[in-house]
Image (spheres, coloured by chain):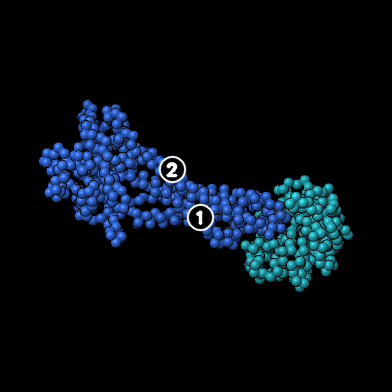
Amino acid sequence: MNNELMIDIQGVHHAYEHDRVIEPVLHGIDLRVRRGEFVIVMGPSGCGKTTLLNILGLMMPPTRAESLNLAGANALTLTEADRTRLRRELIGFVFQRFNLLPTVTARRNVGLPLEIRGENVDGQVDALIKRAGLANYANKKPGQLSAGQQQRFALARALVGRPALLLADEPTGNLDSANAAEVMDLLCAFHRDWGQTIVLITHNDNLAVAADRVLHMRDGRLSE
Amino acid sequence: MLALAWANLMHRKLRTALSALAVGLGIALLLVSKGLANGSIAEVDARMQSVSAEIVILPAQENVIFTNGAPFPGIFERLIARQADESGPLATNVIPVFFGQAHMGGQQQRLFGVDPRQMDLFLGPRRVLAGQVFDRAVGFAELSAQAGRTDSAEILAVDNLSDRLDDGLELVIDDRLRRAGWRDENGIHQEYRLGDVIRLMGRPFRIVGIVEAGVAGRVFAPLQTMRELLNGGQPWSSMFFVQLRPDVDPVRAADHYQAVLGSEARVELKSEYGRLLHESFAQVSMYMSATSGLALVVCFLFILLTMHTMVLERTREIGILKALGMTRAGLVRLSVTEALVVSVAGVAIGIGLAGAAKWGLSIAKPLLTVDLTPALLVIAIALGVLGGTLSALYPGYRAARLEPATALAYE
């Protein structure tokens, strides 16, 4: 971990509009995360955690923001193509619902980020799958895997391109405690070895011990 | 990209197969209808080109396909024969043809009334496969002449004359028409055979000869017989072929004949007959093209709908791919690649179906010619690929425009 900022956002607001009714979700979020830092954001359901993560992951633009810098790039001024490129090169995602493509094998799912980049898939993918203890399941399709296995493959996919920033949205939310512990162990092991910045959102207090810093979110506001 | 597209398509095998089949049906319809139109025209043209002549003289203002009756009185034949230059007559043979109709081989046939003595000009190198070519038929003309008739209908009305007229009630058919045959009262297909009697124009005609396919007509009768039965014995004709002296320039000769015969006749080089057929067939051809084109459009709308449904169904997956950094162009490419795979498979199915239809038609309807030329196949492939691409562009564009977060939240 160093003092260089991976995430530096200020005054981020977001509101959803449903049937002409505007529903504010984020109320001026400020957040700074250093490179290599492991931050957990905790908060109840509906407080805006996923919205914040989507904005950090450039998956949706905020309604309004004073600044939104990722790895030194001002995301507010980027074109759609540049945001896509930044997401591809900088960020890995782990989702609560795993979000593996059901049409291809687990191995191919893991290799997708590299495939999209046009990079060679073979060596890295197999090594990562082996390290995740999933070598025997690599040729199965997601529908043939347990929830825990799916999430470990999803984690491998998020990390295969060696992203500098890993965003995890309730990665253990759909797992039992044993599988959740296994996924978190794996996540921590990768963090220890590769030192990527991690922002993980959860409402599970037990995960807090893994983080360098824990933030709390309530009603669209963030606090230490 | 291709592997991902393939995986997506294989995930929904039945839908993929149905989409490819829909495209295949459209392509097959296009190929068969165009192939049938082109094949029929090419086959008729080739048959007309087989006549040993350089010029055709047709009634003006008439469609060459539907020309019937005999608009040219005998004076035309004599006028054509009389044209000469300093070296002698321009024509070595003036070949009158009198058209009639014969329902044979399950469809209406153009019955060629020709002078038996000129049959060799129609046959060329083609062989007589069975029987003979009207050598008895000349007797009919002689009989008519001997009767000294002023009104041939009167002669034909004489009951006991009917048997004697048999000499002229003869047909020569080609081998293709022989195979097309007829259906007996039990619906069983029977080929025509020598000696079979066919009732035409209220009279029993006997098949006396079978010749190799490729001659101008599929069915011939003696010219005089046709004139007796349909034109009161008057020497009128439906059209003429003109065989020129070898040293005569056909173009100049055609111009000369046109000038002499005036606006009643249309004088053309025989080599132009194919063009005349295409012109005459243009409306039918346009209708067939429009019908098959419409079928093709429906097929591509089916692909559009399929791709659109696939995009909707896979909205979450599109969100995943976008989250992983796939570009808008990449998503459009994925969508287009999937549609291309379906289209290429559809084109292959279509070509296969068209080939099967051609084979089936050659068995069931031997008189139909489906001409699947390389050019037509190239057009079908191009249409399939282009249509598939265009059909996928809009769904692909829609997928590409989705915000990843919106797509991932889609249920």
Q: Say which colour chain A has.
A: cyan
Please identify the quarter of the rendering in which residue B154 is found.
top left
**SS type, badge 1:** helix
Position in image of residue B47 (x %, y %): 31, 45
Residue pictured at 79% horizontal, 53% vertical: A23
**Element at label 2:** helix
The residue that label 1 is drawn on is B22
Q: Which quadrant of the figure contains the N terminus of chain B?
A: bottom right
Q: Name the quadrant of the C terminus of chain B.
A: bottom right
Q: Which residue is mark 2?
A: B286
Residue B289's disc number: none
- Identify the amino acid type marked 1: Ala
Same-chain status of marks 2 and 1: yes
Q: Earlier in the sequence, mark 2 or mark 1?
A: 1
**Marks 2 and 1: CB-CB under 8 Å?**
no
Residue type at numbered disc 2 = Met
Q: Is residue A180 visible?
A: yes
User: Relative to B135, is B43 on the left or the right?
Assistant: right
